[in-house]
Image (cartoon, rainbow, N blue to C red):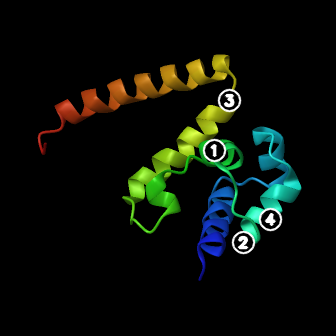
Amino acid sequence: MDNRTYLGIRIHDARKACSLTQQELSDETGVSIKMIQCIEGGKVNPSFEILFPIVNRLGLTTSNLFSVEPDEHEEEINRFLGKFRACNRANQMVLLNTLDFLAEQLLALQGDDPSN
């Protein structure tokens, strides 16, 4: 498998994992749907300027794009970050405050658990 095909598969799989259509990814990144189709089809070698908004929205890292095996939790976190980045600033703050509250609650429960 050549590099363009590999990249296309990784982008396609990440887009599907985020439950996005090609049109939605295009709308959210400003990259034309035709370009997204060409990237996913392994037909083009996209420039950094084209690839960056796609990778950013999908929450991909270099370990996701290249043959390095990422930790399974890293992939889940990066998918969440892609969704987070797609939100407007007000909704990002809601998410951050909610996550902070949940983390505090879980840490408190963890402290009460004698098995820790």
Disc nearer the start of the sequence (1/4): 4
At 26% from the left and 27% from the top, the residue drawn is 108
Closer mark to the observer between disc 4 and disc 3: 4
Residue 87 x, y percent position in the rendering: 68, 29
* Kind of residue at badge 3: Cys
For label 1, the SS is: helix
Q: Residues within 10 Å of mark 2 (few under 14, many from 20)?
A: some
Given residues 29 and 38, the one toward you in this image is 38
Q: Which quadrant is the N terminus positioned in?
A: bottom right
Q: Which residue is mark 4?
A: 38
At 57% from the left and 18% from the top, the residue drawn is 93
Disc nearer the start of the sequence (1/2): 2
**Distance CA(mark 3)–CA(mark 1):** 17 Å
Residue 10 x, y percent position in the rendering: 60, 65
**Distance CA(mark 3)–CA(mark 2):** 29 Å
**Distance CA(mark 2)–CA(mark 4):** 6 Å
Q: Residues within 10 Å of mark 4 (few under 14, many from 20)?
A: some
* Kind of residue at badge 4: Cys
* Kind of residue at badge 1: Phe
Q: Which residue is mark 3?
A: 87
At 40% from the left and 53% from the top, the residue drawn is 73
Q: Which residue is mark 1?
A: 52
At 65% from the left and 22% from the top, the residue drawn is 91
Vertical arrangement, residue 67 with respect to residue 87, above or below = below
Vertical arrangement, residue 74 with respect to residue 68, above or below = above
Residue 62 x, y percent position in the rendering: 47, 54
For label 3, the SS is: loop
* Kind of residue at badge 2: Gly
What numbered label is drawn on residue 2? Answer: none
The answer to whether residue 105 is left or right of residue 37 is left
**Distance CA(mark 1)–CA(mark 2):** 17 Å
Q: Which residue is mark 2?
A: 42
